[in-house]
Every structure is written in C-alpha cells, then in structure tokens.
Amino acid sequence: MKKILNNPENYVDEMLAGMTAAHPEYYRLHGDSGKVVARAKAGKSGKVGIVTGGGSGHLPIFTGYVGEGLLDACAIGDVFASPSAEQMADAIRAADSGAGVLRLYGNYGGDVMNFDMAGELVEFEDITCTTVLLADDVASAPPEEAEKRRGVAGMVYAFKMAGAAAEEGRDLDGVTAVAQKAADACRSIGAALSPCTVPQAGKPTFEIADDEMEMGMGIHGEPGVWRGKLKTADEIAGEMMDRLLADMPLTSGDRVSVMVNSLGATPPEELYILYRMVKSRLEEAGATIVMPLVGRYATSMEMAGVSFTLCKLDEDLEKLLNAPCDCAFWRVG
Amino acid sequence: MTITRDTLLAAIDRITAAMERDFDMLNSADGALGDGDLGVTMTRGMRAITAMKDDLPDDIGMALFQCAQAFTKSSGSSYGTLMATGLMSAAKTLRGEESIDAARVPELIAAARDKMQERGKAELGGKTVLDSLDYVAKATSGADDMAQAAADAVDQAMVDFRDKPATVGRARIFGEKSIGMDDPGMLAMQSVVKAATGR
C-alpha cells in the first residue's frame, strides 16, 4: 500500500478534522460521534431537512455536498463502510427544523438497514422521515430488476434538485417527490482501469492486469459487465453511451444534463477527450445538453476510471438544477 | 423458570467473554467471505453493553432497548444492526415487565427472526444468522430443556448449512465457493447462544 496517511485507523477522523478546518464556512461536526457533518450555518427554520450517509472514500460524495441548496447533514462511515444507525439518527436530528427530514442515499444493503433503524430511533422523538434511494447504476442489474441497482453518481443530481426544492420552501412530500423524480431520471455506468486500496485493509479492492479495463464495475470494485483489453477513449465513451441510451432512450427535443465523472485518478484531460463522444451521441439522439458536469463529483479513492450519468430533465427539474447552491466542491449561481 | 435483570446481567458477562475468546476466529471466518470485521463488530458491541450494564433498569424491555442502542452506537456493520433489530423487537414486547416466564423465549426469538428478516430483506434458507435463529425458535418451542435445545439447534444449523451455498448477504457473491465454509454470522450466533445458555 502506498498512501499518504498516518495511522490507517484514524483515516476518516483525520480527514474530517482537516475538511472542517479548511472549510469552516461550510462544514461543522455535529454531535459526539465525530462522524456527522452538518452545515456551518443551519438552514432556515421550517425548511425540510435532507440527510445522506454512506461510507467514506467517495469525496465529494457524501459529506462534500452538505451546503446551501444541497444537503443539511450527513453521517459518514469508515472507508466503504456504512455509518452506524445512531450516527444516522444524529444526522437526522441535525437536519430537522420541524418540517421533517428526507433520507436521500444510495441503494446499498448496509446503508438501507441502518437508515431504516435510524428512522425507528428518531420516531420516538416525533421526527417525520421519508426515504428516496438512488439506484442509477445500469450495470448492476437488468431493467426488470431496476430496484436492485446500486446508487452511484446520480446522487449528485438528486442532492441538487431536492436541495433546491427544500430551499424554495416546498414541504416534505414535495421535496420527496422531487428527489424521487430526479432519482428516476438518472442512469449511470462506470468503467475502471485500476483498483483502489482501503487504508484499513491495506490491499487493493480487486486485481486487474496493466492492459485491461472493466466495463460496468461498481464504485467499491463490484464485478461489472465484461473485462478485457483497454479500448480507445472513443470506443469506451461510445459503448458507455450505448448502454445508457439503451436503458433510457432519448428522443428529439429531450433535455438532459450529463456528468462525465472521474472515479479518482483519471485526470480532467481524459474526461474532456471522452466528452467529445458523449456530446455527439446525445446530439445524434436529438437531445439538448443542459449544464454538462465534467470533473470529479463522485469518486472511489484513487481508482482510475470514469462514470457517465444522464439525467433527463423536465421543466421543474431543469429549474431546480439551475437554482443556486454552494458547498466547498460545487457552486451554482 | 423466570428471567429477570440478574439473569440478563449474567448472560451479558458470558456472551462478552465468549466474544473476546472468539475474536480472531470470527474475523478470519468473515475475512474468507466478507470484510473480516465480524469479531470487531461483536466485541465492540458487547464491550459497549458491558460498560453500561450496571445502569441497566429492572424493566427487561428497557434494558434490552439499551442493549440494542449500544449496538447501534458501536457499529455500522449490517450484522450489528441486525443484532440491534432483534433486541429491539424483544424490547418492545417486554416493555414494562421485570420478570418474564422462560416459556415465552421461543416466541420472542421467532419475532426477532421475523423483524431481522424484514430489515435485512432476506429469505430463510440463505445460510445466514436468520437460519440459526429459525432453528432455535423451532427447537425451543415446547422443549423440556430449552437451554439444551437451543444449544443443540445452533450446532445443527451449522451442520445442515455447511455444504450449501450462501444465497443472501455479502457471502452470496462467492456463490458455489461458499460451499463447505461456515457462515460467519451463523458462527457468531452459535457462540452467542451457547454462552447465553451456559453451554
């Protein structure tokens, strides 16, 4: 393992300490677990709260998106490990200002179990919660089992749109409906070139030969669709777009946002090379691209690779996407 | 036989000792099929319960509720949350009672099994802790020596499932490779039940 760290046991605590110290205007630690991040300045009273949670190792997901027009609080676990139900309950408490709290996170067994348990814990305190799960990774299950899919970078769109809806003053049902619509409108797929190493495990999450890639691999190294020789950027982008468009066909006049996201080690240069093909495929389909996001939005530590996310917009979602938001990693407006 | 706070405290001591003893065994069994931290989850949870056991109330329901909370605080692992879910199920049923008839244990275990199944969204027969609990619930129901029946049931579950593939939980991705290997969650429940019953 070659990583810049101190004791691997303290990896997440030290990361959070540094992050809150570097951006005190955005983030603060809430409660005594040391694993809950909340907005430095609480949202307006009476605003619907939005929380997320999951394992560390995906910055800016999850904690990074705590901020105005986005999330209110986040419970964060060890690298690739779910936070505890009690930490999630603390995040819900931090996010609640009396109007209820939306739990918005990715479809992973451990996280679902713990967030359900957290809901049971805060029920005693009369906090009303709703849930929307992201299940946007098309490679993780076929369309007929879409509810089994894992949640990946589509989360960023759902955070943005639900966050804007909450900021506008919509009620819990309204914010939940927006989040569900955004989640349903997103499709993602990833491709990996090299693995990452979980600090506490000390060894790579999977092995892959120097000249190979894996199409459809999950963000924790879950097996993908195929593994084979590394292809060219245009071939990779073309296949990824084919797979996304097969799952969510677009027709002339559709408006979409698209994210070309680095899984960690892949540089912006290569993302821009890929974006050419992404744009031409979408134009061929007759779709209009709104606010393309090219950069590092949802990562898997130092994994080399890329993910694409398509988010099909209607008038409301497009308005919410364009609304202002502000966190240390992303600002709109 | 009746179960009171004292019965519970004695069982906590035995289970905590068993988890410390089995720490490495559970970690390595879990390492073969998962992320290798089951021993950590169980010792952390039991240490948290032991740390506050002197403050546990006489109300068995409330005492079990606090034990469940100790698990939800100490760990985010799915197994820890399942333990907490099972304890919470019994806690809700027993709230306000300071002594309970041991004859109610089988139904409490069956109810915990159902709640855990719901939370884990898993079927019986998938080679998980749910199968161990299912065996215990069925074997203890109407048994003369309930403690012995429970201890035998967890052993029998290990034997019956050893040569089956795991079909739910993280071990599922190992499919056929899990044949012949003991499920780590079932091993942990075997230790817990044997310690709880003093076997």
Image (cartoon, rainbow, N blue to C red):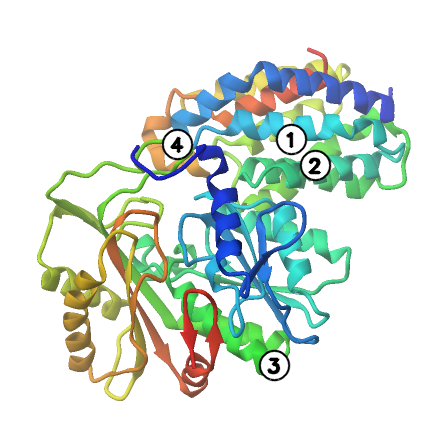
| Cβ–Cβ under 8 Å for marks 2 and 4 | no
Residue corresponding to mark 1: B45
Residue denoted by label 3 = A170
Q: Is residue B194 left or right of residue B184?
A: right
Q: Which residue is mark 2?
A: B70
- Across and down, in percent, residue A323 comes to 46, 82
Are discs 3 and 1 located on one and the same chain?
no
Judge whether residue B51 can be spotted in this image.
yes
Give the quarter of the figure containing the N terminus of chain A.
top left
Q: CA distance from mark 2 to mark 1?
A: 6 Å
Type of the residue with mark 2: Ala
Q: Which residue is mark 4?
A: A201
Q: How many residues crowd mark 3 within 10 Å: few (<14), some (14–19), many (20+)?
A: some
Point out the frontmost of discs 2 and 4: 4
User: Rounded to the nearest whole Å, what is the CA distance between mark 2 and mark 4?
Assistant: 25 Å
Q: Is residue B167 visible?
A: no
Does A137 sit left or right of B70 as displayed?
Answer: left
